[in-house]
Image (cartoon, coloured by chain):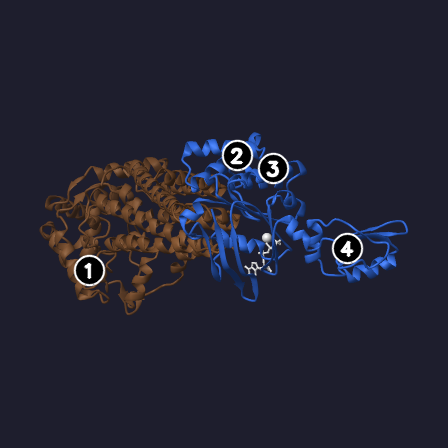
Amino acid sequence: MELTIDRLTKQYQNKIAVDRISLTLTRGVYGLLGANGAGKTTLMRMMCGILRPTSGEVKFNGIDVNHEDYRDVLGYLPQYFGYYPEFTAMEFLCYMASLKGLPKQRAKEKSTELLELVSLFDMAKRKIKTFSGGMKQRLGIAQAMLNNPKILILDEPTAGLDPKERVRFRNLISQLGIDRIVLLSTHIVTDIENIAETILIMKDGQLIHKGSLEDIIKIIEGKVFECSVDSKTAKKLSNLYPIINLREGKDKTFIRFVCDENPCENAISVRATLEDLYLYYFSEVGENA
Amino acid sequence: MHSFFDIVGFEYKKMFKRKSTMVSLFLLVIIVVLFNIVSVTSTSYWHLTGGTSTFEAMKLDKEVIRSKAGVMDEVFIKEAIEQNTIMINDDENYLINEYGRHLKSDAYIKYVLPYKKAVDIINNVYEKNTGELSTDGFQVFNPGRVKPIDTLTVNDAKSFYASINRALVVYITGLANLSQNEKEKHFDMLSEVTTPYYNDHYDGYLYFNKYLEVIALAIMIAIAFCISPVFAHEYYLKTDQIILSSKYGKSKAIFAKLFTGVTFSVAVSVVVLFYFLLSMLSIHGINGANMAIQTINVYSTYPLTLLQASLIGINVTIFITLFFGILTMLFSAWLKSPFLVITASFLLLFAPGLFNVSPKTRLLYQLFQIFPAKATQYSNIYSNYLFEVLGSVYTPATFYIVFASIGSLLTIPFIKYTFKNHQIG
Ligand SMILES: Nc1ncnc2c1ncn2[C@@H]1O[C@H](COP(=O)(O)OP(=O)(O)OP(=O)(O)O)[C@@H](O)[C@H]1O
Ligand SMILES: [Mg+2]
């Protein structure tokens, strides 16, 4: 099982949204991190065959992304997408199942099963227009899994989920990753931290890092510091280094920041997290002040 | 194949869950019923005097006409001329005042109405006194003027059909904008017209054909509202992404949409048109099926009965609405916004009506005749202007059906291509 992306590029009139990305994905969960506009959605659209790349190609076990056989093994949850407001959850899933080639009976069974999985079973007969944002999102997740896809591409799947559903979802994804390729994008770093075996970091259309959590965090290991200083020093530090956390106290300000070496004597080095790394990459120095 | 019809089922479900669909179909039914009523109320009946209701008057008129149902042979024409002569020679039948002689209704009912179809034909065919009414540029209003039939004697009955034929030949020969090939086609058709004609009450067929264009237009408007969202709504709802990334999203799903649009268009036309025909026949009477269409317009060369003409009208309308439906779906896949799609469909329906093209510029004239709202008009389906393609001449009905079929088939790949290649982002 191998999904290969070869020098994939998407150029809009005056903007390169995805810039020569090459990548090979095998079974497992991949977490795609990147700031707004980094090109995550654009990359995923091209991987789902709904956006023609300017150049480059996407193949699964040698099957081109534009082939029906590719779509047959694909499950996709788009970032923004719509539903038929007058359809019930069940009708919607059965419709999607028919588009994915499931026979009627099988479609019903599978839809019921998935509705249960995303805790929407009680809502099966309700019109989608009466659903909350998070419920719709869960229905979207269910829809992506109808055909038991080998490639599951989820664009911000946890957006709008409450903490309980988010935990359920994470567990679900970890299981799915056992015998599938799961690629999910998110802004919520903790969602990926716990489940993604491989983390991909995108910036300005390019893939700047790829590796396991440990590998990636190594980059800033020993460079994360915390200290409590007066507000003047805090201001000075935040102009110099990427700030991860800043909390104004009574007369002291607590800050957590990334820095190559300890800049002031009362700062202590702490364990780096993925969030530190994310902010290190994506926050412009000085913007938090 | 199973999954195909499953998808079609869902497409129908989407369509019927839209309020616009139900509203359009409801309005279509209202319009059909309205024209059922209009066909009764818009006519002035001879028996409509004093206390008689419209419906009663309609029935009485019909009884008088039906009393002479049968072959329009020499005996019949003789009788028509005879009765007319008796009528005009008796002043009792007229109301005479300083403005002239006015025929009384009961005299008309007695002497003319039973032979009305023949009398109308005679008055059309034997009219040679076109100059009589104008004197030195003055129009003289002369209600008691001599009608062609008034000048005939029973001996003229023998030459009734020959006179029709002669008048038609003169008429066709004199049409300035017809090619020689077209004229020959007309003469061919003319030679196939069966004589003698039948005489009967034909209002069911008459009003069906008269209002066919309105009903066809109403059908197409309803179709536009019902199927313009077929593709456009997917873009609008942003469901396009999940459809296009699904296994059959770029193949079966598109054909299922097309199939839905096509079957819906055809089903609506078939049901509405046959309902309209049957309702008109049950309101006005089922008689007149075997009457020649010349009894409606004597200057027609088409060798058809009213039943045949009506069925051809239905056929043409079905094919035209089918093509219209397919074009609506092309707009739907291509223009994306449901509003633009409806606008484009309406332009297709109504824009040709804004222009008055003279048949002198035949190519342009014929181009306009192909537009859906025109192609479903009785006057265009049985027009004098035929279609000449590669040296062969075809009647408009044949041309419309072939044109709509070929057009539909050629449009389908474009629709598929457009939706399939729709880019997200
Ligand atoms: N149709 C388009 N025309 C022009 N530029 C576009 C188009 N679609 C996207 N872009 C640009 O491409 C870049 C990448 O956009 P994309 O939606 O892939 O980002 P993203 O990483 O998914 O962001 P987000 O986290 O906000 O979802 C952005 O700069 C965006 O402005
Ligand atoms: Mg995005």
- For the colour blue, the matching chain is A
What residue is disc 3 on?
A171
Q: CA distance from mark 1 to mark 4?
A: 87 Å
Is mark 2 in CB contact (under 8 Å) with mark 1? no
In this orientation, which residue lies closer to the viewer: B219 or A141? A141
Are discs 4 and 3 located on one and the same chain? yes
Q: Earlier in the sequence, mark 2 or mark 3?
A: 2
At x 27% / y 43%, what residue is drawn?
A: B205
Across and down, in percent, residue A122 comes to 57, 29
The amino acid at mark 2 is Leu
What residue is disc 2 on?
A114
Q: Earlier in the sequence, mark 4 or mark 3?
A: 3
What residue is disc 1 on?
B393
**Tint of chain B:** brown
What residue is disc 4 on?
A257
Are discs 3 and 1 located on one and the same chain? no
Across and down, in percent, residue A165 comes to 63, 37
Q: CA distance from mark 2 to mark 1?
A: 63 Å
The amino acid at mark 4 is Phe
